Each structure stands twice: as structure tokens, then as C-alpha cells.
Image (spheres, rainbow, N blue to C red):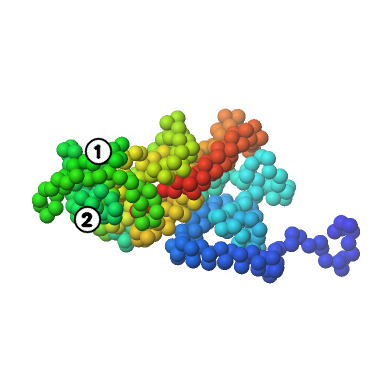
Amino acid sequence: MTITEQPVSTPPAPGPVAPDDRMTAGQWGRLAGLLALFTLLTITTGIWGLVVVLGIVLMVFLHELGHYVAAKRAGMKVTEFFIGFGPRIWSFRRGETEYGLKAVPAGAYVKIIGMSSLEEVAPEDEAKSYRQGRFRDRFMVVTAGPLMNLASALVLIFIMLTVLGAPNGSLTKQPDQTKWKIDKIYEGTGAAAAGLKAGDKITAISGKPVATREDVADLIAGKQGQTLPVTYVRAGESHTVPVALKPYKTEDGYQACCLGISQKLTDIKTEKVNPIVAVPRSFQELGVIAGKSLGALGSFFTPSGLGNFADQVVNARTDRQNATTAASTVPNTKAPTSATGSGSAEPGQDRLISMIGVFHIGTSAAASGVFALLFLFVLLNISLGLLNLVPLLPFDGGHAAIAVYEKVQERRRHLTGRYFTDVSRLMPVVYFVVIVLVGIFITTTYLDITNPLRVD
């Protein structure tokens, strides 16, 4: 019966039932499973593996926190804010929002009511829905997540410059590529047999001058099985020896070719930047890295970029068997090293990486020091922020584009009320984008398992 038909002494019908703060047996089991997963992760990959996973979760959490704070400030109704996905482990309700933890530690999410014209909203909540908000509020809500990622990257850059110190006081300035020397000689290689040692500087191969590290790879490209005269300088004296180019295995089991050396730049000094100077420099570094990230993303989605990526996927097993050891693109406080190979393209060229690849690079980078790990998270935050600004649904940028379109339509039609975009007409685009994202997820995961990137 209705409330008005109840006797006066009867309490009103209860509203929505808040989640019970007490955990059920099933939820305790999920929590135990999550803790067991973290324990296994720590045992198998070390503490840095756990740090990388928690860092990724924190990065996504901050992204969603940006949406949450902006929505709350705009007076919109946020019904859920969870860390993780899947079955609920534990939650509590404060006001209109349920906060909690879920079983799959793959990030976080925020649920704001009325994100499009397709979503059904209770009449009493319509005024607090996203779609009824002012343009500036809607635009801020959907862009707050990417902006939070860019702000996180900015803070990390500032910390790296001022607290840890950066190579020559910069994250993006390239050191002199001509100032390098051999960092390591691999056992059982032609270089080891010829008597080359760490600290030597190769100046010529087959009589052709060597200036940069890349010149070495270029001059031995396609010459596996040959013996070439290599000129090097040691203690100010020049020597020329014959070096056989043959395959060898690195300590971690990778099949490599052909010279058998790794190199490091010598024109690198770790410098801490004055905080006052670091503020504008941090913005400058952020802009440079963001520009390069946009360029790399744009290069990937070109016919040649997609073709190269498809070739990498199809030939992943073969490429791993014949792979050269590759230089890490993640800088560190030490002079970066790279192993000289056959001169083929870098494995990371025109290549996206999956979360498995991020985890692999993260744990490897952490071994080089905190600086390398923080730089990785700078790149990840910038990439996540820029990717979500793509003006297509289901990205945040798609919602921002709709908000702008609706504002233009309101002014164009001189409307006093809200103009709502018919999102159903955009669903084919949404499906296409989702299919592309799923395809990228599958292929990058396969590639990162079959032929993972090397980080030295």
C-alpha cells in the first residue's frame, strides 16, 4: 500500500538500502584472493612488481578522482566511486555515493548519473544529472580526469628535476651521442675473442668511421657470419683487430647478434635543478614529452605505422628468435646502455604496448633506480591523459566534443533550455572505436608475451 494509506504510527517505507559495512564470507574470500595475488606478485617479481601494479592503480585512481571532484563541485550526483572492477569486496555509503574496493585491481571508476541522453534517470534526480549541467561544468567534469594525469606528470617531473636530479638537468635534452664507450663485453662473442674490453671506444669498422652508437649497428647490419676489422681506442692508443660477427645469448636467455657489446654514453652528469628554475622547466619538459607522445601516436595510426605493427605481430616469434638486444627508451640516472645488434629497426618503433608490456618495462626500469620508474609513470600519465582527450566516444574527449556541440547548437538555435545530442546516432562510431581498442588490446598483449621489449 502507499505511504498515505499507512496508519500514522507506521514508519515510512525505507529508502535505498545502504550497503552493509560488514563483509560476507564471499567478500572475505575475495579479499584473501587479492592479497594472495599481491603476495605471489611480490614473490615472483620482487617488491618492484607490486610497486608497479599499485602505481598503475594509483594513476587511474587519480584520473577518476579528477572526474569525481569536478562532478561533486558541479552538484552532480555521483553514485559510485570504486577502486578496482568486478565483484565487490567492501564498500560504504556516504551521502549519495558508495565508495569501496573491488576484486580486480585494474584501476578505478566513477559513476555519474545521466552521462548521455540514452541513460534513464529518476525524475527526482534529473536536475543533478551530468546532462543537465551547465556547459562549463560538463566540460570540466569530462576533462578533469586527463588534466589530473597531466598534473600528476608535471609533479613527477618537478620531483625528478629537484629531488633526484636529471641527466644534465633535463629529461628531454639529448646528450652528445658521439661521447660513448663500451660498457660491457658479452662472453663467447667475437668482441670477447678479439680482446675488446669495457672502456674501449670503437672508432671505425671496415675502415669506415664510427661517430655515434647507432653507427656501429649500421656498419654491421646484414653481415652476420662475417669477420670485420674493428678499430678501437684504449688508453689513447688505436688498435685494429678482426671481430667475428656471430649470434650469442645474453644472461637472461635472449638470442642476440652480432658484435657482442653494450655501450653507454659518457656525456651525462646527474644535476639537481633549483626549485625556482624547475617550475617553468617542468612545464617545458611536459610540453616536449607530450608533443613527442602525440607524434608517436600519430605516426602509429598511419598506413606505414600500422603496416609495421602488423608485421611485428605476424612475425613476433621469428623476431624474438632473431632479435637483437635493444636499448631501453626509459632513461635512468646512469649512462644509458644499448647492445649493438644487426642494425634492424628498434623493436619499439611504431609499437604500442599492453599492460603486460608496461609491467615488464616497469619492473625492469625499477632495477635501474627510482628515476627510471618515475619517468615511466610520467610517460604513462601523459599517454593516458592525451589518449582520453581523443574527441570520440567512449573517451572523455568524446563527451567534451558533445558538450561543445550542444553549446554551439544552443546558441545557434537561440534555445533557452538544454539541447541534447541524440547519442544513439553516434553508437556505430562507439562500436567501431571499441572494436579497434579490443583489437589493439589483443594484439599488443600477444606481442608483449611473444616478443617482449628488452630493457637493459
Near-viewer residue (26 or 249): 249
Residue 6 sits in which quadrant?
bottom right
| Left or right: 82 as drawn, with respect to 366 | right
Residue at 51 percent of width and 57 percent of height: 57
Residue at 48 percent of width and 44 percent of height: 447
Q: Residues within 10 Å of mark 2 (few under 14, many from 20)?
A: some
* Circle count: 2
Q: From the top left corner, tell me how far across and down residue 309 is, in percent.
A: 45, 37
| Dot 2 amino acid type | Ala
Q: From the top left corner, tell me how far across and down residue 258 is, in percent.
A: 30, 45
Looking at the rendered structure, which numbered label has been put on residue 65?
A: none
Residue at 61 percent of width and 60 percent of height: 103
| Residue with the mark numbered 1 | 219
Residue at 85 percent of width and 59 percent of height: 3
Instruction: Tell me if residue 102 can be seen.
Output: yes
| Residue with the mark numbered 2 | 198
